[in-house]
Amino acid sequence: MDPERTRHARRLFAGIAPEYDRMGSVLSFGQEPRWRRFLVSKVNAIPGSWVLDVATGTGLVARELARKNVRVVGLDQSPDMVSRGLDAVRERGLDGRVRFALGQAQALPFGDGAFDAVTFTYLLRYVDDPAATVAELVRVLRPGGVMASLEFHVPPEPWARAGWLAYTKTAMPLVGWTASSEWYRTGRFLGRSITEFVERYPLPVQVRWWQEAGMRRVRTKLLTNGAAVVTWAVKSTPVLGDESADLEHRDG
């Protein structure tokens, strides 16, 4: 399986692994570490549990999860990212808790219900069928397990949205340019891709993907005036009347 969006993501992120950890924080004005911590706080896995972190990149979320004394498998399609992730966990003495695997979210190389929790970050903009990808992620989660995701978002308030659009169209590419030509291209792409994704798939649509895949009590939280969104839910046997979702539009 190698659809067009997947190939594009592989090309886009080729060569940016060395600066990935630093630039993610720079491009978000230092907010991304806080977003990751909020994401991980929603994963209530007990020590010793197995957690799958998809689109792990260099393992930023995987490393945060490992500090909860869980065992993590970080999956990514980029060999460069996985290589950097391996170096990072070894440097921090976390290699006993974090493993890495190459693979694609659309066809996970794991059995049904193999993990106690699943996380994914900045993933769905890079797949051809987001709803099917969510269903595949839910497949490898055990019943009762938590799934949580972090994604960029477009601020809903007009004043915040105007500033965000101006930043992503002009400043973000220039900030990327200070690092490398690869980051300049990434900066140019990110704002457009985020806006197009949110316009095509508003948050209620994304929540419906989770519900239709078997997740219940789906909750969302907008962070930093809506520049990011964390979504989390529990996989369980469907119960009549329990289709509720909680979309929180407060800043966090």
Image (cartoon, grey):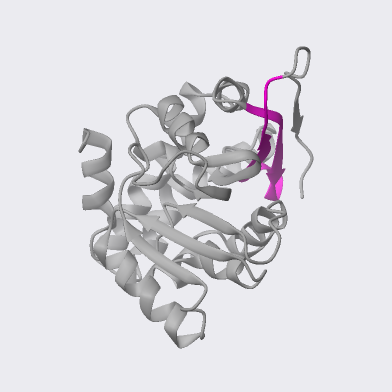
- Magenta stretch, residue numbers: 215-238
Number of numbered discs visible in the structure rendering: 0
Residue 16 in view = no
Q: Is residue 101 left or right of residue 65?
A: left
Between 173 and 47, the residue placed more toward the observer is: 47
Residue 222 at x, y percent in the picture? 69, 42
Secondary structure mostly seen in the magenta stretch = strand
Q: Is residue 21 above or below residue 43?
A: below
Q: Is residue 162 left or right of residue 80?
A: right
Between 109 and 133, the residue placed more toward the observer is: 109
Q: Is residue 70 left or right of residue 247?
A: left
At 71% across and 51% down in the image, what residue appears?
42
Residue 100 at x, y percent in the picture? 38, 65
Q: Which quarter of the image is occupied by the N terminus?
A: top left
Which residue sits furthest top? 240
Quadrant of res 66: bottom right
Residue 92 at x, y percent in the picture? 51, 85
Quadrant of res 61: bottom right
At 68% across and 56% down in the image, what residue appears?
45
Residue 16 at x, y percent in the picture? 30, 65
At 32% across and 65% down in the image, what residue appears?
81
Between 24 and 74, the residue placed more toward the observer is: 74
Between 123 and 24, the residue placed more toward the observer is: 123
